[in-house]
Image (tube, rainbow, N blue to C red):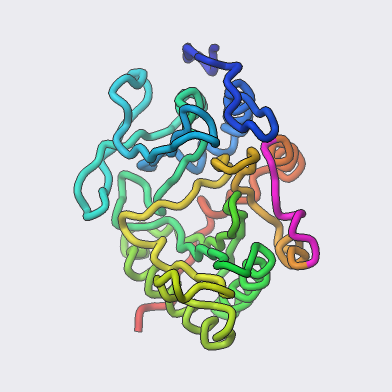
């Protein structure tokens, strides 16, 4: 396969990676080749973590932080944070061919940090990761996302939402500050936790910021810790290793608000995501361009 001047050796194209629907490796590669037009803007310059399913979603999977040594010489790497701020040599997916190369590794999921490799201490966005506990679902996340939007609007902050492609949803607050205007991970985490605590106070029976899993049944966990230096979040447009080829999909706020009435409208598979990009463009583009400042700590 040739893509923008790069030659890619592809393998096992007939292998079924999503057995429930017969979605093959060739279809995974085709999706990433087509979505790369917008997705690469969100992976470029970042320390990417891959989650691979060599035998499809019915088989075992593993996370891969260090970029494989057998990578093409045009797939770059960058030093980034390990779990305890140790150095890891991650892949950087700076062009469409690099994204397709990872798809050929059966890297169904692409996870990205909030910061670029060149400025690891300064996140480009603050994220609210809404994780539904037992007896809750994406409808509860959608209701909470709208409430987060309104809280942020009161502080003159804009935000955008996306599905996780799995059970939950994320709300991103674009920052994009540089120099003295740049934010820190701790500032973002503290801000997200403060908003989460407000929501927990408003809805003590339906929201928690507590990490303990035994506290989550019947509640949505507002995971403020996803703003930590070493954490990654599923990249926008990435497929998920679920039973069907769903993807993390940017949403319009009208769709989020309508989500509690029609939760199926918040589930998008590969073909639908491509159709949405053709119709709406990149609904997540402001995360890379909009400059905003969070309230000062304290």
Image quadrant in which you'd find residue 266: bottom right
Indicate left or right for 142 with 260 as reference.
left
Any magenta on residue 13? no
From what the image shows, is residue 145 above or below residue 124? below
Which contiguous range is marked in magenta? 261-270
Q: Could you say where residue 34 lies in the image, as x and y percent from the top left? A: 63, 28
Q: Can the viewer see residue 45?
A: no
Q: Quadrant of the N terminus?
A: top right
Q: Could you say where residue 168 lies in the image, as x and y percent from the top left? A: 58, 59
Q: Residue at x 46, y 28 (%)?
A: 54
From what the image shows, is residue 173 above or below residue 19? below
Image quadrant in which you'd find residue 123: bottom left
Q: Residue at x 29, y 35 (%)?
A: 66
Farthest-out residue, left: 86
Q: Quadrant of the C terminus?
A: bottom left
- Name the one closer to the observer, 10 or 218: 218
Q: Can the viewer see residue 165?
A: yes
Indicate left or right for 35 with 215 as reference.
right
Image quadrant in which you'd find residue 51: top left
Q: Residue at x 68, y 28 (%)?
A: 22
């Amino acid at each position: 396969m040739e893509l923008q001047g790069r030659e890619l050796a592809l393998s096992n194209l007939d292998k079924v990676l999503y057995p429930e629907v017969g979605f093959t490796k060739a279809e995974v590669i085709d999706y990433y080749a087509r979505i790369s037009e917008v997705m690469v803007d969100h992976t470029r310059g970042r320390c990417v973590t891959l989650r691979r399913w060599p035998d499809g979603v019915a088989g075992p999977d593993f996370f891969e932080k260090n970029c494989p040594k057998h990578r093409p010489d045009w797939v770059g790497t960058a030093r980034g944070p390990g779990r305890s701020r140790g150095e890891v040599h991650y892949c950087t997916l700076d062009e469409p061919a690099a994204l397709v190369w990872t798809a050929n590794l059966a890297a169904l999921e692409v996870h990205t940090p909030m910061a670029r490799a060149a400025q690891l201490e300064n996140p480009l966005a603050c994220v609210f990761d809404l994780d539904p506990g037992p007896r809750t679902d994406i409808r509860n996340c959608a209701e909470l996302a709208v409430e987060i939007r309104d809280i942020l609007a009161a502080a003159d902050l804009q935000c955008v939402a996306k599905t996780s492609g799995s059970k939950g949803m994320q709300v991103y607050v674009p920052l994009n500050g540089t120099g003295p205007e740049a934010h820190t991970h701790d500032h973002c985490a503290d801000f997200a936790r403060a908003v989460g605590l407000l929501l927990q106070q408003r809805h003590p029976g339906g929201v928690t910021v507590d990490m303990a899993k035994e506290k989550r049944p019947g509640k949505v966990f507002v995971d403020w810790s996803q703003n930590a230096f070493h954490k990654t979040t599923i990249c926008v447009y990435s497929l998920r290793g679920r039973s069907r080829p769903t993807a993390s999909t940017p949403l319009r706020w009208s769709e989020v608000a309508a989500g509690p009435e029609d939760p199926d409208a918040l589930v998008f598979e590969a073909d639908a995501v491509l159709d949405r990009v053709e119709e709406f463009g990149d609904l997540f583009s402001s995360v890379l361009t909009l400059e905003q400042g969070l309230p000062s700590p304290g």
